[in-house]
Amino acid sequence: MRTKLKNMEKIDLRSDTVTRPTPEMLQAMVAAETGDDVFKEDPTVNAFEERVAAMFGQEAGLFVPSGVMSNQLCVFELTSPGDEIILEEKAHIFNYEASSAAMISGVQLRPLKGVHGLLSPEDVEAAVRTTNDWDPHTRVIALENTTNKGGGAFYSLDTIKEMREIADRHKLFLHLDGARIWNALAEAGYDAETIGRNFDTISVCFSKGLGAPVGSMMLSTRERITRARRTRKMLGGGMRQIGLLAAAAEYALDHHFKKLKIDNLRSKQLAKVISENPHFTVEPDSVFTNILLFDTPGPASEVLEILDENGIMMTAFGPQTIRAVFHFQISDEQFDRVCSFFEFYGKS
Ligand SMILES: Cc1ncc(COP(=O)(O)O)c(C=O)c1O
């Protein structure tokens, strides 16, 4: 009789947020110098905020608990109630942030249909409103890089620059939801500063592929970050000795960033294996970084159940779509097992 595996023993490809702190990361946390961050007295946080801001060519940073809080602080900072934000219809801000842009900032979201979650400059420019009395005020263009629901796609430097030009032409702000910007940096051939300078506000996460247990950062001008500190407090996000958390995030940046290329490569390798099994549909050319989306012959739930029985966890991303996300805590042996599953699925 087969014994049922606990989740911890399974190959967990549901998300890159499922990683656990490594012993080395825990050591870095224990060794961190700390102070009360509400008093701006945590030296580890202060230094880390400066370091990440400089990396992205921004003046200042604010360490926050989550990517949602970071995005929403940016939205709050850039808009007034009634303003409109242009984004892609698969955007995290539109789909997965519990309507907080409407609740916290009183803004309207204008989702546009793009490709793999990426907006085209032409569509964005066409969506900018006029100044007629009855039009909402377009205020922000929000890009997601890499895209989550869009399957890990990333913007080219040229497109980012074009978006900046559109924003300048129409006096708009440009925001980057860079929860997985690290996977784009590992793949796209541009560096953080080159792309970072194009944006008015940036949100980056340390708790996705980088593998920190918690932590995101808002990046922008010193003035905006000063105001956002107050908004963070208002939302209950003022934290005390969080040098512990910043140390984990910094450890992740220093030691796990270089592993992202492997995650990006594995999702492409698995896509190839899946594409060779006629039961599934996947376009290997539509796999960009560590997120892989593929279609199932029947309900995704049936395939997920069989995967689970074989010790592999993925998530449904539609009635007949499954998402797998690679991260550094998948071993070579586990990766081979996942590939074998898809090689032999439906062939016995
Ligand atoms: C693109 C994107 N933005 C923002 C977030 C929000 O991050 P958090 O879960 O830390 O709030 C996520 C989470 O997966 C994401 O994928």
Image (cartoon, rainbow, N blue to C red):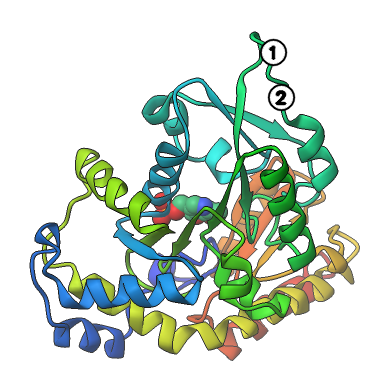
SS assignment at label 2: loop
Horizontally, is 284 left or right of 257 in the view?
right
Looking at the image, is 348 positioned above or below residue 331? above
Q: Is residue 287 visible?
A: no
In 3D space, how far apart are the residues under numbered discs 2 and 1 (Cα atoms)? 8 Å
| Nearest to the observer: residue 59 or residue 47 | 59
Q: Image quadrant of residue 195?
A: bottom right
Provide residue 189's location: percent of width, then percent of height: 72, 80
* Residue at (67, 45) in percent of width and height: 167
Provide residue 100's location: percent of width, then percent of height: 42, 32
Q: Please, what is the three-letter code of the amino acid marked with disc 2? A: Arg
Horizontally, is 120 left or right of 325 in the view?
right
| Nearest to the observer: residue 312 or residue 171 | 171
Q: Are marks 2 and 1 in contact (CB under 8 Å)?
A: yes
SS assignment at label 1: loop
* Residue at (65, 50) in percent of width and height: 149
Provide residue 138's location: percent of width, then percent of height: 63, 29
Looking at the image, is 338 positioned above or below residue 317? below
Which label was assigned to residue 132? 1
| Nearest to the observer: residue 296 or residue 345 | 296
* Residue at (54, 25) in percent of width and height: 83
Which label was assigned to residue 1? none
Residue at label 2?
129
Q: Is residue 140 visible?
A: yes
